[in-house]
Image (cartoon, rainbow, N blue to C red):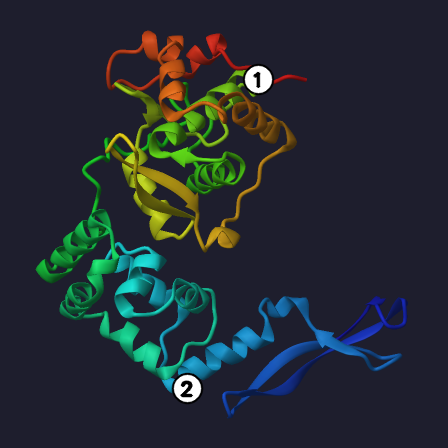
């Protein structure tokens, strides 16, 4: 088949024919032969991979190598880790590997046979329990509790991931005043969390919930729709996303955030959020207007302590006029104390 297309070498439109090119790759001393569609210029003979192929030839060679050598796929490695509700950091710790190693394998990097065998052994909950007992001292109490609960579920044959007791309800899947006339998007929610982690000096569990609330409600105030479609519930310490516990667990599992336990001078233990190793895989962007909203929230609240942010949220009619534990209507955004400066 021949078509007329632009050739970058000739810098002009040329007849281009499509062919199948047999390419050989050397993967760890093993020859991997692939049939790859290419476009060839009739004028200069230059060939390039046809964009319809849809994948990186090196990744395709790695995939063929895995299949020929019975190695786990990146997707299967991720599934095994999530089966036990472990973040990349925790999974790596109990296996005696680095977080970067697990992140690389899940991102398409080629694992060695020894690591593959260790990860494959995690198909057995008993093996994971042994590893947890062997190396669990490096984990926080919260991480160990989550892992042990997930292992118990796997041993009992129950499906599904461990759900935090802090999980209040599922996020409403509707377009209404409960969601700011926007259907909830987990990706945009996670992207907003990551944005605040990158642009606010310290993000704690308490402050994050309020930052998210102010961003969504301020966007509704200025654009008549929220950023994420999240619903917020009136709680004692201020507004929180309706499913904040489940969303926190999922973001940590997906590697978008790292949540670290921190002991403060007053003796209290809290959580601080930082960006995780998989943020580059997060496919969500914000419009210029949404970014102005996020920047306005960050500029107004970033210098406040978590307690000060919480106290400020208690002065909003959205919190004052909503019954305890009820969802907050986005109509309350009209009286929000923050504004976007033009």
The residue positioned farthest toward the left in the image shown: 156
Distance of mark 2 from mark 1, alpha carbons?
56 Å
Q: What residue is drawn where x is 34% and y is 34%? A: 205
Decide if residue 158 is in sight here: no
Q: Quadrant of residue 87?
A: bottom left
According to the picture, the residue beneath numbered tag 2 turns out to be 68
Helix, strand or loop at mark 1: helix
Q: What residue is drawn where x is 46% and y is 43%? A: 187
Q: Which mark is residue 86?
A: none
Relative image position of residue 252 (x, y in whole percent): 35, 48
Q: What residue is drawn where x is 83% and y is 82%? A: 45
Helix, strand or loop at mark 2: helix
The residue positioned farthest toward the front in the image shown: 265
The answer to whether residue 130 is left or right of residue 77 is left
Decide if residue 245 is in sight here: yes
Relative image position of residue 60 (x, y in whole percent): 53, 76
Q: Quadrant of residue 264?
A: top left
Camera-nearest residue between 184 and 108: 108
Whether pointer 2 and pointer 1 mark residues with C-beta atoms closer than 8 Å, the reply is: no
Q: From the viewer's perspective, is residue 126 above or below residue 298? A: below
Relative image position of residue 127 (x, y in whole percent): 17, 71
Lower position in the chain sequence, tag 2 or tag 1: 2
Camera-nearest residue between 11 and 77: 77
Q: From the viewer's perspective, is residue 15 above or below residue 221? A: below
Q: What residue is drawn where x is 42% and y is 80%? A: 66
Quadrant occupied by the N terminus: bottom right
According to the picture, the residue beneath numbered tag 1 turns out to be 222
Relative image position of residue 336 (x, y in whole percent): 47, 12
The answer to whether residue 241 is left or right of residue 136 is right
Q: Could you classify mark 2 by the number of other residues whose Cα lies within 10 Å: few (under 14), some (14-19), or many (20 or more)? A: few
The answer to whether residue 277 is left or right of residue 10 is left
């Amino acid at each position: 088949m021949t078509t007329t297309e632009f050739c970058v070498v000739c810098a002009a439109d040329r007849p281009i024919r499509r062919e199948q090119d047999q390419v050989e790759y050397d993967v760890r001393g093993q020859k991997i032969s692939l049939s790859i569609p290419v476009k060839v210029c009739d004028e200069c003979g230059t060939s390039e991979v046809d964009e319809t192929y849809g994948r990186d030839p090196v990744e395709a060679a790695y995939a063929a190598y895995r299949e020929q050598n019975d190695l786990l796929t990146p997707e299967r490695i991720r599934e095994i880790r999530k089966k036990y509700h472990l973040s990349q950091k925790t999974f790596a710790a109990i296996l005696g590997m680095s977080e970067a190693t697990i992140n690389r394998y899940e991102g398409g990097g080629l694992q060695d046979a020894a690591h593959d065998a260790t990860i494959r052994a995690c198909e057995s909950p008993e093996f994971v329990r042994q590893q947890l007992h062997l190396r669990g001292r490096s984990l926080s109490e919260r991480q160990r509790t989550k892992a042990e609960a997930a292992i118990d579920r796997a041993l009992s044959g129950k499906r599904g991931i461990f759900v935090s007791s802090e999980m209040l309800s599922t996020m409403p899947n509707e377009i209404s005043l409960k969601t700011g006339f926007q259907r909830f998007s987990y990706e945009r929610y996670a992207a907003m969390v990551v944005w605040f982690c990158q642009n606010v000096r310290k993000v704690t569990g308490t402050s994050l919930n309020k930052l998210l609330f102010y961003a969504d409600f301020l966007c509704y105030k200025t654009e008549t729709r929220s950023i994420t479609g999240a619903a917020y519930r009136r709680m004692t310490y201020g507004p929180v996303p309706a499913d904040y516990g489940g969303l926190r667990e999922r973001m940590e599992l997906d590697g978008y955030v790292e949540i670290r336990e921190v002991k403060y001078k007053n003796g209290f233990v809290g959580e601080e959020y930082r960006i995780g190793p998989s943020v580059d895989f997060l496919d969500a962007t914000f419009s210029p207007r949404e970014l102005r909203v996020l920047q306005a929230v960050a500029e107004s609240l970033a210098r406040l302590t978590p307690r000060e942010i919480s106290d400020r949220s208690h002065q909003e009619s959205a919190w004052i006029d909503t019954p305890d534990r009820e969802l907050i209507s986005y109509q309350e955004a009209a009286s929000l104390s923050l504004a976007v400066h033009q």
